[in-house]
Amino acid sequence: MAGQVWGTSSLGGYMYSDNLSKELRMAVQPMTRFRQFADIKDAAHQGMNKGDTFHWNVYNNVATQGAALTEGTDIPETSYTITQGTLTITEYGNSVPFSEKLDDLSEHSVREVINKVLKNDAAKALDAAAAAQFDAAPLRMVGTATGGAVLTTNGTATATNTSALNTYHVKNTVDTMKERNIPSYQSGDYFCVAWPSTLRSLKNSLETIHQYTSEGFGMIMNGEIGRYEGVRFIEQTNIAKGTGMGTDASGVWSGGLSDWAVFFGEDTVAEAIAVPEEMRGKIPTDYGRNRGVAWYYLGGFGIVHTAAAESRILIWDSAA
């Protein structure tokens, strides 16, 4: 059988040996970063037996802005348009089978170990699914110099990054987001999620400006390291550098000076949940000799605003 067995040391035999430590030690794991920002307020309404498509309405501004009135004339009339977003409910999961012999002879609980590794796997898998929707944002900012940047609005960076992310780029990005009327996420602040090394140059610069802390906030997000220019920064390692995000998702940017970062305000990605992630035990087969544990989730993620004019997400990006 595939999975965990007693006969192969690295697949199970090591779970009992002479003088085995009683302490259960796990490989280091990152916590979720992107999924914590997904809007799940509508999740309870999806439920079961409602199909695999989840919708939400986006109500746009009125077509004609109001203005001063002239006595004797009627108040003008206008209208607004409604657009609709959608996501598909999808099954996610993973499993680890194991043998009855391994379970009976192991000093460490096989089920406990598998539960832990599968919970870590579920967190990373669902975080990646949420991140993929953040990456669908149409707004892309490229640092063309230490004091220069260019914005594109079609979801693709057309210039190549030539600078590490620095205080100028953060200020420029914040100004751009404010001037596009992107609402703040919390308490007037935006958020940024990036790799620690992407933020390193910025953090070094801030050491000479002021203390880089998050004191005073009642709610600190997973991975939050500080605040600058109205942006609260989150370090993440779930999504690999040079892959999975940005226009150039095939490798590290050619300039080698930075990597992607995701800036955003409120109302970014929706999550609809039909069945929350849960651990499931396999019904034993072969008269109880073949066993297993799985995690399972039925739901989906979708970017809320796909039009550039309404986008809430801006990605620090590069064409190559």
Image (cartoon, rainbow, N blue to C red):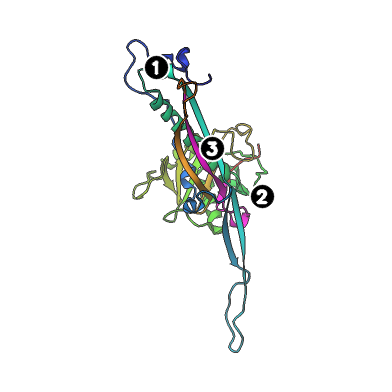
- Report how far apart the C-alphas of labels 2 and 3 lie in the structure: 30 Å
- Report how far apart the C-alphas of labels 1 and 3 lie in the structure: 29 Å
Q: Is residue 126 visible?
A: yes
Dot 3: within a 10 Å radius of its alpha carbon, few (fewer than 14), some, or many (20 or more) residues?
Answer: some
In the picture of the structure, the residue carrying the numbered disc 2 is 154
Q: Tell me the tag on residue 92.
A: 3
Provide residue 89's location: percent of width, then percent of height.
57, 45
Q: As rendered, which of 57 and 171 lies closer to the eye?
A: 57
Q: Which sits earlier in the primary sequence, circle 1 or circle 3? A: 1
Provide residue 110's location: percent of width, then percent of height.
40, 23
Magenta span covers which residues? 291-314
Q: Which sits earlier in the primary sequence, circle 1 or circle 2? A: 1
Residue at figure coordinates x 43%, y 42% from the top left: 206
Residue 315, quarter of the rendered image:
top right
Q: Tell me the tag on residue 88.
A: none
Dot 1: within a 10 Å radius of its alpha carbon, few (fewer than 14), some, or many (20 or more) residues?
Answer: many
In the picture of the structure, the residue carrying the numbered disc 1 is 15
Q: Amino acid at mark 1?
A: Met
Contact (Cβ within 8 Å) of mark 1 with mark 3: no
Q: Amino acid at mark 2?
A: Asn
- Drawn side of residue 191 relative to residue 154, left or right: left
The quarter in which the C terminus is drawn is top right
Residue at figure coordinates x 55%, y 33% from the top left: 241
Mark in front: 1 vs 2: 1
Q: As rendered, which of 23 and 187 lies closer to the eye?
A: 23
Mark in front: 2 vs 3: 3
Q: Is residue 147 visible?
A: no
Q: Amino acid at mark 3?
A: Tyr
